[in-house]
Image: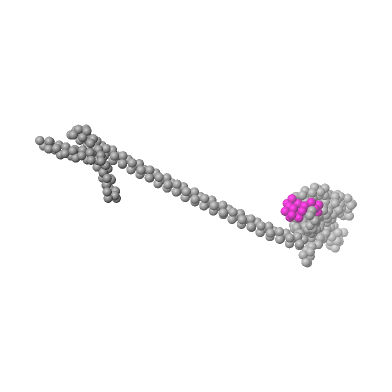
Amino acid sequence: MTTSPVNNAGCLSFLLPFFKIVPHQHVMVVERLGQFNRVAGPGMNILVPFIDNARPFIYHSLIDLPGGLTRQVAQSSTFIDLRERLLDFPKQSVITADNVVIEINAVLYYRITDAQKAVYAIADLNDAMEKLTQTTLRNIIGELTLDETLSSRDQINHRLLDILDDATNRWGVDVTRVELQEITPPPDVRQTMELQMTAERRRRAQMLQAEGDKQAAILTAEGQAEARLREAQSSKQASILKAEGEAEALRARATAEAKARELAALAEANALEVISTKVGQVAAVQYLIGVRYLESLQKMADGKSTKTFIPYEAAGALGAVGALREVFQQIPEEGKK
């Protein structure tokens, strides 16, 4: 008995849906008679006809619409992706602690670690994660002001990650990263913030200008002070050198005058010694007194006065000088004899 090709093709087409090829990094939840049976891994998997069934898994994704709008759609698949996936949420309105309504768009990165829990522990995993993220974000933003919200993105991301990762562990999900994609304040608040930013930048510019002028004035004053100090030091050094030069000149002049006086006194002493040996000491003293009188008279005559008065005592001194002159004249004649 032979089978026709038509019968073989019909049999294959009937059995083909019960052969499932699971891709790499994917798994499939297999139910038998409506109960969980196993988690089928990548590769060829055979399902018993009419007994085994692949449990479908629902994914959510956003699609772009005209006008910049987005819409979330649900997709069903018998394969559960174990790779890290991105869950993008539409913008939502939240109220800050200072009663400012802002719009926030968040994205969530997660990975399914237990396919059985992801299917049976929660009815709709993506929808549950989305609602949990939105409510948690509202609670966190409600504790912060607008300025704190705009300047504390990292803190908000870390708080969201800790809360979501702890809550989704029982669903067989590991949340790896949460990011605030966009924070949009109302138009009037944005305008006020821009004005405030412009004023702040102008204030900073004025402060920098004032600080620069102050620093320049300080540097100029320091430079002028250093210049005056150098000038004073140079003047002081010049005065010291001048004083030292004048002192040296005075010492040299005094030394020369002392030397001249010494030589003059020595010559006069020698002359008196010669005179005293020739005419006697008394005559030598009279000679010295007469010479001093003559020098005094010479100084008196050097004045501008047309009349000079000679003291009476000068006559005796001049007479003694005249007598000594005669004695000196006789000395050579005695020598000749």
Q: Position of residue 4 (x, y in %)?
A: 85, 62
Q: Is residue 251 above or below residue 61?
A: above
Q: Position of residue 268 (x, y in %)?
A: 24, 37
- Residue 58 at least partly seen: yes
State the extent of the magenta-drawn residues as a range. Answer: 136-157
How many marks can you see?
0
Q: Is residue 143 magenta?
A: yes
Residue 115: percent from the left, percent from the top?
A: 81, 50
Look at the image and tell me whether residue 54 can be seen.
no
Would you say 195 lies left or right of 77 here?
A: left
The residue lying toward the viewer, choosing from 48 and 148, is 148
Q: Residue at x 83, y 58 (%)?
A: 76
Instruction: Indicate the quadrant containing the C terminus: top left, top right, bottom left or bottom right.
Output: top left
Please give the name of the residue rendered at 86% of the width and 50% of the height, measured from the top-left corner: 36
Magenta-highlighted stretch: main secondary structure? Answer: helix
Quarter of the image where one finds residue 212: bottom right
Find residue 247 and report its image quarter: top left
Q: Residue at x 46, y 47 (%)?
A: 233
